[in-house]
Amino acid sequence: DVKVTQSSRYLVKRTGEKVFLECVQDMDHENMFWYRQDPGLGLRLIYFSYDVKMKEKGDIPEGYSVSREKKERFSLILESASTNQTSMYLCASSRDRGDIQYFGAGTRLSVL
Amino acid sequence: QQQVKQSPQSLIVQKGGISIINCAYENTAFDYFPWYQQFPGKGPALLIAIRPDVSEKKEGRFTISFNKSAKQFSLHIMDSQPGDSATYFCAASMGNNDMRFGAGTRLTVKP
């Protein structure tokens, strides 16, 4: 079974803090994704990576950056957290870009 | 830009009833249409998927109906059960391109 593990289920941070969200997958997938999920807006793609050290912006990259130093690990970074970044963050991986995506359980981030 | 439009946003169905969730897409190049199911506290998981060469796919109580000319597809849950209460997302992708998700439907099945 594919397993996508997100390091934290819940995080509470202060405005202006630097926040790291970590994601690890165990299926040797080429592609990894970061989404945020907000009620009524569905899943919005923040960034994705199709190879180690490669990244591309998604639909809402502003205020975020990513890092992929190893194939199995994809990190989302909030350089200076703001209250409008309070959300559920989901990591996913897939073998091919248009293929089935396997999701982690999500990290619910609150920025106060 | 929302390439996949999903409705309704929320749905309440009695146990044993039929739940129907609809999606419409714009890009005729899409060739893969999955549905994901998400329970509270969990990430979305693939439920059922269809490709446009067939008009219907059934897996147990779950059926996808696909209308290529209308650019619409829908999920039907027969004999809905309280355990089906979840958020459902439709999605679409084409070849080696990103998957586009609908906004989600929160289904509640009342006992």
Image (spheres, rainbow, N blue to C red):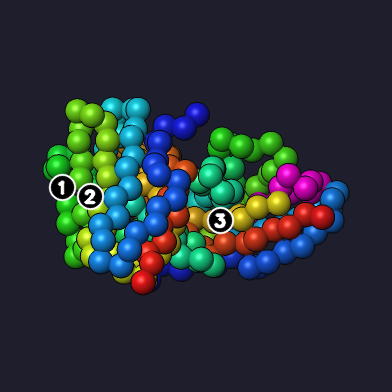
Image: magenta residue range: A74-85
Whether label 1 touches label 2, CB < 8 Å: yes
Q: Classify mark 1: helix, strand or loop.
A: strand
Q: Are marks 3 and 2 on the same chain?
A: no
User: Could you tell whether A23 is left or right of B88 in the image?
Assistant: right
Type of residue at label 2? Answer: Ile
Residue at coordinates 32% horizontally, 42% vertically from top-left? B22
Q: Secondary structure at mark 2?
A: strand
Left or right, A26 with respect to A81, comes to left
Position of residue B87 relative to residue A79, above or below, is below
Residue at label 1? B56
**Distance from the alpha carbon under mark 3 to that under mark 2:** 25 Å
- The image shows residue B104 at horizontal and vertical percentages of 45, 48
Residue A88: quarter of image? bottom right
Q: Is residue B16 above or below residue B72?
A: below
Marks 1 and 2 on same chain? yes
The one of B12 and B95 positioned closer to us in this rendering: B12
Residue labelled with disc 2: B64
Quadrant in the picture for residue B24: top left
Kindly identify the amino acid type of the residue bearing the numbered disc 3: Leu
Which mark is nearer the camera, 3 or 2?
A: 2
Q: CA distance from mark 1 to mark 2?
A: 6 Å
Can residue A54 be seen in this snapshot?
no
Q: Which labelled disc corresponds to residue A29?
A: none
The residue that disc 3 covers is A90
At label 1, the amino acid type is Glu
- The chain letter under disc 1 is B
Residue A109 lies left or right of residue B86; in this view the side is: right
